[in-house]
Image: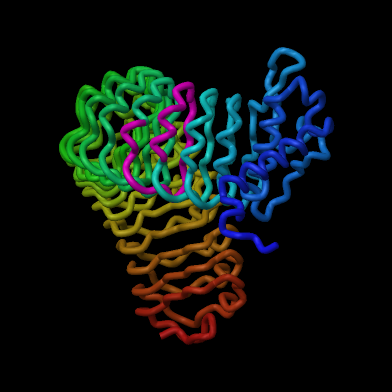
Amino acid sequence: MATTLETMPTADSAATLLQASLVRQCSNGIAVPNPQNNPGLVEDCAALLSARDALAGTAPLNWSADLDISSWWGIALGLHPVPIKRVDWLNLGAVHLTGTVPPELGALTELRHLDLSNNQLTGSIPGELGKLDSLMFLYLGANRLAGPIPSKLATLTNLQWLDLSDNRLTGAIPPDLRALTNLELLDVSGNQLTGGIPAWIGDFTEVKWLNLSDNQLVGNIPRELGALTSLEWLSLRRNRVSGQIPPELSALSMLVTLDLSLNNLIGQIPPELRALTKLTVFDLSINQLTGEVPRWLGELVHLKWLSLSHNQLAGRIPHELGALVELTNLDFGRNELTGEIPPELRKLVRLEALELWGNDLRGNVPPWLSELTNLKQLDLSLNQLSGEVPPELGMLADLEILDLSNNRLTGGVPPRLGRPLYLKELDLSGNQLSGEIPRELGMLANLAILDLGDNWLTGKIPPELGQLVNLKELDLSKNQLSGKVPPELNGLPFLGSVDLWGNELTGPVGGSFAP
């Protein structure tokens, strides 16, 4: 007999039949031993089988009614009274899942830990996850999830960690989430969230890690964030936040990391922030801050990373910064700083990166920089520095980048600059250097960029530069070099950019002739 419209199964009835079938499979005594004594685990088994294919996508999962559930990948059973057991741990992080987050997971009512992070999951976050009343840890970060953050997650009042980072989520942070007052970690970074930073986040008095970075959030930083007295890590990096830095943040006495970079913040750095004595990372770079570099920064003696670059800060570099002996990165590039490089910075012996480029600094390049033996990156370019290039810089054995370009340096290129074995970039262009190019530069076996352009260099190009087997860019333009281009340069395997214009050279290099 043909099926009539009245006898055709509905979607709900089909789902009920499927669920009943899965329950029967899970009651076979294999997937769930003693199923009559573990009805909750049978239901968990059925929910996972129902979710398996949608969740896995093209990735294999060994979830099967013919295998004990305790042997299923990513599954752990809770320590409930014997013989009753339930699924309370689902960890499938970084296992190449390509499917979606199935709403069926909302049936795992005893689940406390759900980790699906670092996969390739698509689709939206199902509101059914809001049924997981016991959930304490939810990790969905580093996927391709889209759509809004479900307001139904607000029912997860036991949640301590919520990580939705590095997805494609949109819309505002739902106001209903203010109910999650037990949160210790909230990470929604790396999405496309809009709207303002909710003031009610200040109610999350247990939160230690708050990361809202890399979104499109606007408006001011709420002063209510100053109530988060347990906070240790705060990042609002790369948003569209504007206004001034609220002095109320000074109450965050446990704060170790404060990153407000890449926003539209204005005004001066609040002096109240000197109270943040536990800071190790302080990044206010790429804003529109004005005023001077505060002297009290020298009181934050645990700082390891200090970046105020790309602002409109003026005045001198405070000598008090010499007290920051744990500092490894100091970046004041692209400001309006004046004066000389203070000698007190010679105390920063752990410094690995010193970037003071793009200011109006004057005086000499200090020879004592050679005492900073851990330096890997030294960038003093685009200033008004004068005098000679200190040969002592060749003593920096770990140096990888040396950029003194676009200053007023005179004298010759020190042969001792051929000593740093790890040097990858040497840029002395845009100065008034004279004399010959030292052949010792050919000893820089790891050098990828050599720029000596726009100087007053004379003589021939040393053939020893043909030993720079990793060289990719060579600029000797706008000098007074003469003679033939060394044929050795034509044998460099990675050399792709050569500029010899503005000299008196002859011969081919890289398939072209020198002008």
The N terminus lies in quadrant = bottom right
* Residue 391 percent across, percent down from the top left: 44, 49
The C terminus lies in quadrant = bottom left
State the residue lying farthest toward the front: 1
Q: Which residue is nearer to you in this view: 140 or 500? A: 140
* Residue 270 percent across, percent down from the top left: 20, 28
Q: Which residue is nearer to you in this view: 270 or 234? A: 234
Horizontal side of residue 343 vs 125, given as left or right: left
- Which portion, as a residue range, is magenta? 150-176
Horizontal side of residue 336 vs 210, given as left or right: left
Horizontal side of residue 262 vs 137, given as left or right: left
Residue at (45% x, 31% y) in the render: 349
Q: Is residue 356 visible?
A: no
Q: Which residue is nearer to you in this view: 461 or 427? A: 427
Circle count? 0
Q: Is residue 91 visible?
A: yes
Q: Is residue 174 magenta?
A: yes
Q: Is residue 429 above or below residue 227?
A: below
Q: Is residue 387 magenta?
A: no
Residue at (26% x, 29% y) in the render: 199
* Residue 86 percent across, percent down from the top left: 68, 24
Colouring of the image:
rainbow
Residue at (41% x, 71% y) in the render: 476
Q: Is residue 236 above or below residue 226?
A: below
Residue at (37% x, 30% y) in the render: 177
Q: Quadrant of residue 291?
A: top left
* Residue 139 percent across, percent down from the top left: 53, 36
State the residue lying farthest toward the top: 81
